[in-house]
Amino acid sequence: MIVSGKAVVVPGTNIDTDVLYPGIYLNIDDPDLMKPYLFEGLDPSLRDQLVSDTVLIVGANFGMGSSREHVPLAMKASGVRCVIGSSFARIFYRNCVNLALPAISCPEAAKAAKAGSEISIDAVAGKVTVDGREFVAAPVPPFMLEMLERGGLIPWAQHKLAQS
Amino acid sequence: MGYTVAEKILRAHSDTDHVEPGQVVMVRCDVVLANDVTGPIAFRQMEKMGTDEVFDRSKVVMVADHFAPAKDERSAILIKRLKEWSLAHGVAFYDQGRGGIEHTLLVQEGWVVPGSVIVGGDSHTCTHGALGAFSSGLGSTDIAHCLVFGEFWEAVPGTIQVTVKGEKGRFVTGKDVILAVISQIGAGGGTDNVLEFVGPGVRALSLDERLAVSNLAVESGSETGIFPADEVTAAYLDGRTEKKWDAVHSDPDASYSRQIEVDFDRLEPLVAKPHNPENVVPVSEVVGTPIHQVVVGNCSNGTMTDLRQAAQMVRGKHVHERTRMIVVPATQKIYREAIAEGLIDILVEAGAAISTPTCGPCFGGHTGALAPGENSLATTNRNFKGRAGSPEASVYLGNAFVAAATAVAGEIVNPAQVTS
């Protein structure tokens, strides 16, 4: 699976899901209505940089804290196609896999990327390209790769239901 | 090679003979939990999966706690959806006035037994490790899958063994044990792991205090924090549940990713400074910090033990004029018990505002939001920027002794320094 897009850099480490999507807006369950609150507690101007093919560049332990799926749902609804960082908090990572939003661990690529960099990710080959420079990413385990290729947990579940 | 508690429980709940860290297995759930925030999104995802059938309605619990009592129309719609869905599917539903904060509630109502697998659409589902269960906080799409199939995919975690030893000091609680752990391993130090608590000091922790320890496991990135069942667990469960259970312990030759210690003999009450639970210092280092609001409550520290500790510190005194104090009993039963024991009267007389059980003040949803420039000391679990209202406010985390003593002083104090 190959994804490409333009980089938007989210600075900082230990970025929690509260700043990514503050609790006061959790009483929204429609992903399209979540979009205006993404990054609200961190830097609302990051929203203005999002385009239909955005690759988010993030720091270590990204997405720590609350399980709120509003964060990756709002990201997907806002055009984020992939997240590249050095490490991810467990629940955030799961949520990304389940929504077929690749969360790729590649600290060198994340360091090299600047706002607006052209990024390309080959999750199967484990390669990330930043403005033409190639980096080796941590391999995506086979199960997660299959989930991403299937389009996430919903198509995966549909497939299981069709078989049963 | 032997297995850890986590590995044993996962093995018993999957179709594989052998499990090891990193391996992905499908794990069967004994309880699937969601709330008014995460449930409605899970129902949407379930509809997209193309089914309306729940795998086993006796294993599903829905709790209205985050925006309950509904703070506005949008919240009321979510709670209504949660209730209607629960009734239509014949699953357990706890409404306001009938339940409380989901994790304390599930433990209290006997849903959780040692060796079981509890999943919840809430990151603090890790709380249930306090009873020797494997518990996992999941997102809503995961919960949708669990509702349909009764199982979830799981990358088997490693285990960090925490040995607790020494004599527990007078104002030291479970909260301080877990803050000490988070301080040692950091906010991401437990990623891809669970915590397992063993050692002679564990017996000094009541079930209520263990809930606080396990509750903050996620603040270290850990999936859960497991207390292998012992006589404290057995005494708590006696007469509380009809579920059968066996204690699960790690094998002597089990393999750990890391082993650390918490020594009560060197532990004083701790405080996590803004804006990350890993910013832990002894309370003595932040003494004198002015505090505008104190919150005692939430899924980590809203138990009878916490309310007793808080009442002990404010008995016959008044909350400082600078400070507002909010007390949130975690469940309706705890609320009644606290009334019967006279604790609520002590707290109200001191000037505390008592709230019905709700998650509101902890996550900035409603009830007790902070203004710019205000400082809060809370027994809750997160002090992220903007967590409890304004991003220009600051939240300090501490135990109920520290919180209540601070409310009286109007500034952070060491409860050991307060004369009664």
Image: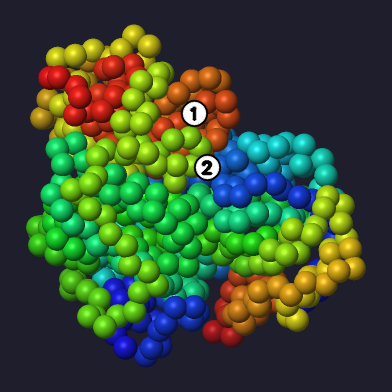
* Quadrant that contains the C terminus of chain B: top left
- Dot 1: few (<14), some (14–19), or many (≥20) neighbours within 10 Å? many
Q: Helix, strand or loop at disc 1?
A: strand
Residue A120: image location, x then y, percent: 83, 68
Q: Chain of mark 1?
A: B
Give coordinates of residue B110: x percent, y percent: 22, 57
In this rendering, would A74 be left or right of A94? Answer: right
Q: Is residue B135 visible?
A: no
- A78 relative to B327, above or below: below
Amino acid on which the number 2 mark rests in the picture: Leu
Residue in the image at 20% along x and 24% along y: B417
* B342 lies left or right of B57: left
Looking at the image, what colour scheme do you see?
rainbow
Residue B245, horizontal then vertical, whole percent: 19, 71
Q: Residue at x 49, y 74 (%)?
A: B155
Q: Nearer the viewer, residue A108 or B381?
A: A108
Circle on res. B394: 1
